[in-house]
Amino acid sequence: MTDRRDFLKASLLGASAAALGGVLPTRASGAPLPLTAGMARVVSTWDFGVPANQAAWAVLSKGGKALDAVEAGVRIPEADLKNHSVGRAGYPDRDGHVSLDASIMNGDGSCGAVAALEHIAHPISVARRVMERTPHVLLVGEGALQFAIEQGFKKEELLTPESERAWKEWLKTARYEPSINNEVRDYGKTGLPGGPGNHDTIGMLAIDQHGQMAGACTTSGMAWKMRGRVGDSPIIGAGLFVDGDVGGATSTGVGEEVIRTVGSFLVVELMRQGRSPQEACKEAVMRIVRKRPEASKTLQVGFLALNKQGEVGAFALQHGFSYAVCDAKKQDGLLPAASVYTTSYT
Ligand code: ASP
């Protein structure tokens, strides 16, 4: 069902895409064109991907590594006090603890992750240390915190007064109801709808000038979740997967649905079999629709993919998912993703 508000939003999306498409070379579908060899590109989820991409671009444009770029990029929303779904100031679990999930993966298959990590403002950097300085892939909870402190990360209170107020407000009803895109944020120049509601993730994928790929994913997960709940973001293959021979994928939305279908791995394997990033993202979303036809109507999942040629794809269950693209031609591109369902839930 489409109402007037949906129509207005769709027009807004179309207008924004057209405006952006005028500068960023795109296909008729709106997806950016592939890169020629030696060119770099970085893509990430949601509007907060725009400043994150710019930080990644500062690394890529100087010939830096994709791995360094994605870490630097996602640290921007991790530090943003206005962002309540990633890093510091993230909304807490139902007991008031800010608990963070993050993963990082290189095109050569090396990877690291942390889950249910508390008191550390940059979980992505701890995930990188897990990758580079331990024989393991994933550290969780107290053990992840202990490792972070051993590595010199500062233990801090991540619950800000604003997030605490929001949590206390939530406690009045204490109903766990993941939002779709139920908030219209200040999208700066673009005006795209969507928004954090009570969850969102930054997933970022990059290809550097040397043709190397890497990805990063970081989130505070679902607001008001049960203590100890872990989403898709720190699960390699679910929230993030990168294979430098093929490409990478990352996800946002209700992590349980992504874990059930091992979504990002699925997207990369479909690309390996010859699907474009766009086709692969769509198929991974349709897998959720087929397995969970009723549930899929009322929740959001979005995938973003970048293949090693630099082609980009994105697809979501619900209207409103946006993704940011940055390369030598344009550093602040934000595009709307196609979706299965077009009704918005504001
Ligand atoms: N995927 C995240 C989680 O389930 C939340 C989100 O991206 O919206 O923790």
Image: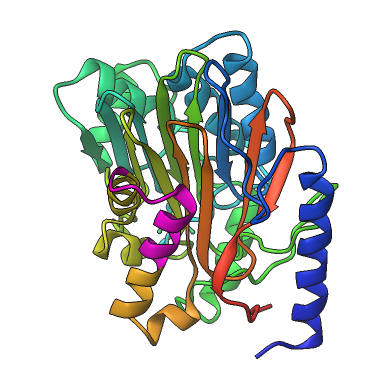
Give the quarter of the figure containing the C terminus.
bottom right
Residue 159 image position (x, y, % from top left):
54, 47
Q: Is residue 245 magenta?
A: no
Foreground pick, 299 / 42: 42
Please say whether residue 94 is visible from this viewpoint: no
Residue 184 position (above or below residue 176): above
Quarter of image, ligand 1: bottom left
Q: Main secondary structure of the magenta part?
A: helix
Q: Residue at x 28, y 59 (%)?
A: 259
Farthest residue to the left: give it.
135
Q: Residue at x 73, y 30 (%)?
A: 331
Viewed as shown, does residue 267 lie left or right of 55? left
Residue 181 image position (x, y, % from top left):
62, 68
Give the quarter of the figure containing the N terminus.
bottom right
Bounds of the magenta segment: 272-285
Q: Residue at x 48, y 62 (%)?
A: 223
Residue 288 image position (x, y, % from top left):
35, 71
The picture quadrant where one finds residue 318 is bottom right
Residue 238 image position (x, y, % from top left):
30, 51
Q: Is residue 284 magenta?
A: yes
The picture quadrant where one finds residue 146 is top left
Viewed as shown, does residue 174 lie left or right of 182? left
Residue 293 position (above or below residue 327): below
Please say whether residue 59 is visible from this viewpoint: yes
Count of numbered circles in the view: 0
Residue 245 position (above or below residue 342): above
Q: Residue at x 56, y 35 (%)?
A: 34
